[in-house]
Each structure stands twice: as structure tokens, then as C-alpha cells.
Image: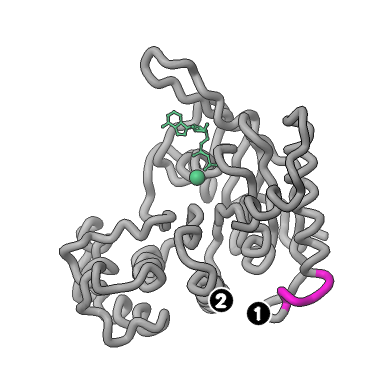
Amino acid sequence: MPVFAQEGYVEVAEVCKVYRNGTREAVEAVSSLSFAVPRGQFVAVLGPSGCGKSTLLMMVGGLEPVTAGRITVDGTPMTGPRTSIGVMFQDATLLPWKSALDNVLFPIRVLKRPLDAYRETAQALLERVGLDGFEHKKPHELSGGMRQRVAICRALVYDPELLLMDEPFSALDAISRDEMNELLLDLWQQYTKTALFVTHSIREAVFLADRVLVMTRRPATIVEDLAVPFPRPRAVTIGETRQFNEICGHLRECIEGNRDRERTRRPKPDLVRRELVG
Ligand SMILES: Nc1ncnc2c1ncn2[C@@H]1O[C@H](COP(=O)(O)OP(=O)(O)O)[C@@H](O)[C@H]1O
Ligand SMILES: [Mg+2]
């Protein structure tokens, strides 16, 4: 039951990616991938490790060229990084010698915009993510979860239209991860950008996204495109509902079904599950 118009703010059309590293064998990471994301939609991209999720995100962000096909954002083909796109990676990648506040302001410095005009925004964002009083701390004085909060503020400070997130919480412990999911859900309800969120956690995808794309193993294509039926604002408790768990079960089947076709012997189900929800 798609609730969004079909025309895409982000359009990925017949995209292929082959990595050729010197004399080594070519790796086809992505094969003929097509989908469109309407403005304002939060899309989670789910798939096993090594299936090409990061490659996809890098291509959409203009950080990696496509081998074939076409990617447009807001009607313009991606040829390099853009200031209308914010990115967040698994590692917070903060500058260790700069304070939390200066790290949040770093993109402004790079973009050569006036720092003073953004200081209040940066401060407000840090407060919004619960880092009031920590703005002058250096990254090593912050926990992993706090560092990722700084990274979220840094991605939002110049008000990008599109947010690309590559497993941003997968290095965190389970409790911090739940907290970050709640925070992102709240932030989303306030800022509403277009987002592509890569994860290998099924529950995280369903909790956060309007729509979940499931990618197959390499070379990756899309095997499922599912509209998440929960209205916003969402409460954490949706995770306990039958509908939520049924959707997760369906997505797990999509991934496992695909996995089974690729393997001659089926792995033990509990091992599969642990690997997928990790
Ligand atoms: N820079 C690169 N050079 C060569 N191969 C790469 C490069 N980046 C990724 N790959 C390969 O492309 C495939 C997809 O990788 P990646 O996009 O990182 O997957 P995922 O994010 O889903 O784990 C993998 O087989 C990986 O080894
Ligand atoms: Mg990756």
C-alpha cells in the first residue's frame, strides 16, 4: 500500500557497479538496481553483509561513480558530493582534537559559510540530542552513543535535504542502539528529510522507515519493496505489536529465502537469525 507518489526525488535507474582494482579480478557489487524515493520518505535498505549497500549509498551520495545506469537527486545527475546531502557512517569519524561543538560546525567551515550564523543551530541540535553541557568535550571524553549523536548533529547542521546513513548505529551496544533509534525517530518527526538508511537489522528498519527495500547477495538487486504501515508519530511500543513482528518475519523470510537459494546447505535457523538481527 504505497502512500507516496511514484515520482522520485532520488532516482536510481538500472545502476550497475563493478570494482576493478588494478590487476585483481573485477567485483560486480551492484547489478541493475532501480528504485525511486519520493521527497520526504524514509527508506531503509536491508541486506546481508557484503551485498553492496554501502556501495549504493556512496553512489547516491556522489562519492563513488556508477559503472552503468543513472542516479539523479532532485532531477540532477549525481557527479560528485553535494551540500544538499548529509552523510553518516558506522563510525562517527569525528576530528579528535576538536570539541563536540566544533565537530558539528566542521561542515560549515568546509563550506566556508559564516560560522557565527550556525553556532546557535549547532548548539540547539546538541541540546536536542541530549548533549547539553558536553559541547566543549573532545570525542575521547564521549561514549560511542554520544559520538554518534554528535555525528547526527553534524549531518543536520547545514540543513541537508537528503540524509544518507550507513549502519550508523551498528557499532553501538544494544541499549545505546535502541536509544539512538528512538532519537532518530523523534528527530525525523521534527525535521522530515528524505533519507536512505542502510542497516542489517530488520527491527531497526521497520521501526524507523516508511518503506523497506531488501537487497539480495552480490551482485545486488532488490527482492522486496515493502511499505511500512505504521503512522507517525510512532511510539517505541509498536515493536511489541503482532503486526510489527509479522512484518519482521516476512522480511526475514525474504532474506533467508534468497540466502537459501544461494547456498547448497541450509544453515541452522538460529544462527541465521542471530546474524541478521545483530
Ligand atoms: N573499493 C572497493 N574495491 C573493490 N571492491 C569493493 C570496494 N568496495 C566494496 N567492494 C566489494 O563490493 C561488494 C559490496 O561491498 P559493500 O558495498 O561494502 O557491501 P555492504 O555495505 O552491503 O556490506 C563486496 O564484495 C566488497 O568486497
Ligand atoms: Mg556496508
Residue 14 in view here:
no
- Residue 131 sits above or below residue 220 on the image: below
**Residue 261: where, in percent of width, then height?**
78, 32
- Is disc 1 placed on a helix, strand or loop? helix
Residue type at numbered disc 2: Glu
Q: Which residues are magenta?
A: 238-243
Q: Nearer the viewer, residue 46 or 9?
A: 46
Find the distance from the CA under tag 2 to the CA under tag 1: 7 Å
| Residue carrying label 1 | 236
Q: Nearer the viewer, residue 72 or 268?
A: 268
- Residue 26 sits above or below residue 259 on the image: above
Residue type at numbered disc 1: Val
- Is disc 2 placed on a helix, strand or loop? helix
**Residue 53: where, in percent of width, then height?**
55, 43
Q: How is the image coloured?
A: one colour
Residue 13 in which image quadrant: top right
Q: Nearer the viewer, residue 262 or 82?
A: 262
**Residue 78: where, in percent of width, then height?**
46, 40
Q: Overall secondary structure of the magenta stretch?
A: helix
Q: Determine whether, in the image, residue 45 is placed left or right of residue 83.
A: right
Residue appearing at x 48%, y 62% in the figure: 169
Asked if the residues shown at circle 2 and circle 1 are in contact, with their CB atoms under 8 angstroms apart, the answer is yes
The local crowd at label 2, few if under 14, some if 14 to 19, many if 20 or more residues have their Cα within 10 Å, is some
| Residue carrying label 2 | 182
Residue appearing at x 39%, y 12% in the figure: 23
- Residue 219 sits above or below residue 203 on the image: above
